[in-house]
Amino acid sequence: MTPPLSILAAAQHSAPVTDWAARIGWVAGLLVFVVFVYWLMRQGWKWRGTLQGDLPELPTAPADPGEPQLTLSGRYHGSTTAGQWLDRIVARGLGTRSRAELTLTDSGLDVVRPGATDFFVPAAALRGARLDKGIAGKVLTEGGLLIVTWEHGGRQLDSGFRADRAEEHPAWVEAVNRLSSTEHTTSTTEHTETEGAR
């Protein structure tokens, strides 16, 4: 049976021609929008860094920090104002996420970051550690982050780390809390003795 002429005529029509000019216009517009959003984010980052410009230079590790108590390999996920997990600190390179190698000694916490700024937290500046699930826009499972609280330039900061092996976190919490409480007790005793001598 021969198909109707109308069907044959429709089959001979070519596919609709793509409007390349409109498509290129849409792609160009989308690229401009993405670049603009990225520029706004960069400006916000710079503005935040300017506001935090009073943060002093980060301490560096002493020549002889002592015997390591614990070591850890993992990632550094950022620092915030203590207790405010979204108030990111970006000054002095603290806003840069990176790989990290942590070493805890009696002198303090040494944070080595390949490709980013290393820093050292003296034992006297440690305020404690805990397990948490989020910091500076990074959210993991409950207890997935090791949060170390420390003081620098008159500010209390929370720095978030995740070990390659998360089962190492509890030992770090215990060790940092023990070191910080020992230092706090020592400094309090020294202060009391000084006051008594007067």
Image (tube, rainbow, N blue to C red):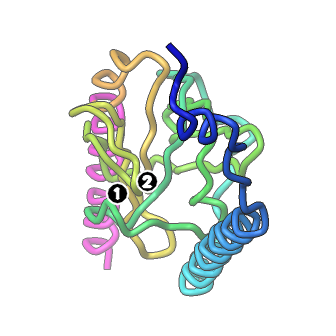
- Amino acid type at circle 2 is Ala
Contact flag, marks 1 and 2 (Cβ < 8 Å): yes
| Residue at (54% x, 19% y) in the render | 2
Q: Which mark is residue 168?
A: none
Magenta stretch: includes residue 17 = no
Upstream in the sequence, badge 1 or badge 2? 2
Left or right: residue 20 versus residue 143 is: right
Secondary structure beneath label 2:
helix
Q: In the image, which residues are magenta?
A: 174-198
Whole-percent x, y for residue 57 in the image: 67, 68
- For the C terminus, which image quadrant? bottom left
Whole-percent x, y for residue 177 in the image: 28, 38
| Residue at (30% x, 32% y) in the render | 173
Whole-percent x, y for residue 78 in the image: 50, 52
Count of numbered circles in the view: 2
Which label lies toward us, 1 or 2? 2
Left or right: residue 55 versus residue 39 is: left
Relative to residue 78, is residue 165 depicted above or below? above
| Residue at (45% x, 38% y) in the render | 161
Residue density around tag 2, few if under 14, some if 14–19, many if 20 or more, within 10 Å: some
Relative to residue 150, is residue 139 depicted above or below? above
Camera-nearest residue between 156 and 192:
156
Q: Which residue is mark 1?
A: 187
Main SS of residues in magenta? helix
Cα–Cα span, label 1 and label 2 = 8 Å
Camera-nearest residue between 17 and 180:
17
Q: Furthest residue to the left? A: 142
| Residue at (28% x, 74% y) in the render | 195
Q: Which mark is residue 124?
A: 2
- Amino acid type at circle 1 is Ser
Residue 98 falls in image quadrant: top right
Left or right: residue 198 versus residue 18 is: left
